[in-house]
Amino acid sequence: MAVIAGNWKMHRGPAETRAFFEALRIEGVPEQHELLVFPPVISLVAAAGARPARVRLGVQNIHWEDEGAFTGEVSASMALEVGAEFALIGHSERRHVFGETDEQVAWKAGTAVRHGLVPVVCLGETLAERRAGRVDEVILRQLDAVLPELAVASRSMIAYEPVWAIGTGEHATPRDASSAHATLRRRLAEALGAGPAGRVPLLYGGSVKPTNAGELLAAEEVDGVLVGGASLDPAEFVAIASAAS
Ligand code: 13P
């Protein structure tokens, strides 16, 4: 079983969202794979009305508070109300463009869990951190910040997305992805036990395309992929899902 998730980022309004689902042909994708789409929040209602039952929806970001004077923000319960079941938490662009801290990421993860949204916590190192040999240190720091929240979640996922691989066309090698995932897996097993709590699916993200999805999905400890650009095209999304064995 693999998780194939599409993060549309700031692409696709409601009309384009409906067109995407009209064009999506998932009949050939083996039933055991889980298909998730994270449209912009403004398109969630359209997505909920147009999606096939097998494609489940998530929100790209939530605020950590339940409500309040937070202009431009969206709460977990609002996202649930319009059909989101999952929430991306701490995506690289939230951390690096909007300055989200590990602490805020943890608050958001906790809020998602409390409301019954499945948190998909994103983490990963920058190129400078990789060159300095600090991959494990950075991703474990980011993971440790959310472990107390994951410990009480009935379900959660982690997406390892090295910052240098996002939107660059340069993906991690299957070996590098496996190595980072093995580091995360060990810490999850230590902290949450080897049972289901410790078996949090680990997704890889960063320039996943139909041409590299097969080898990345076949890599050790890679349980799925979080796809940006290629998930905007229904045929590419299906080709990536079909590459999972
Ligand atoms: P790309 O697939 O466009 O590199 O984006 C990856 C990503 O950030 C998914 O969340």
Image (cartoon, rainbow, N blue to C red):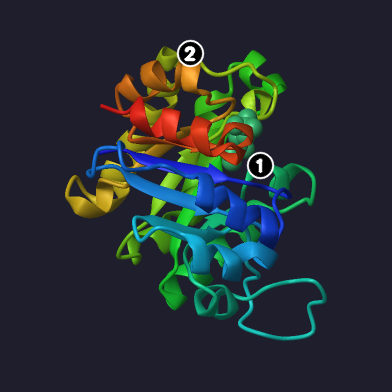
**Amino acid marked by disc 2:** Thr
Does 121 appear above or below 231? Answer: below
Per the image, the residue denoted by label 1 is: 92
Does 197 appear above or below 27? Answer: below
Residue 175 is drawn in which quadrant? top left
**Where residue 58 sits: x, y (%)?**
51, 60
For label 1, being within 8 Å of ligand 1 is answered: yes
Q: How crowded is mark 1: few (under 14 residues within 10 Å), some or many (20 or more)?
A: many
Quadrant showing the N terminus: top left
Per the image, the residue denoted by label 2 is: 173
Instruction: Estimate the spatial distance between the alpha carbons at disc 1 and disc 2, rounded to whole Å.
Output: 19 Å
**Where residue 62 sits: x, y (%)?**
62, 67
**Where residue 30 sits: x, y (%)?**
25, 38
- In this view of the protein, can residue 142 be seen by the observer? no
Q: Which mark is residue 33?
A: none
Which is more toward the observer, 86 or 104?
Answer: 86
Which is more toward the observer, 48 or 161?
Answer: 48
Quadrant showing the C terminus: top left
Residue 122 is drawn in which quadrant? top right
Instruction: Report the image quarter containing ligand 1.
Output: top right
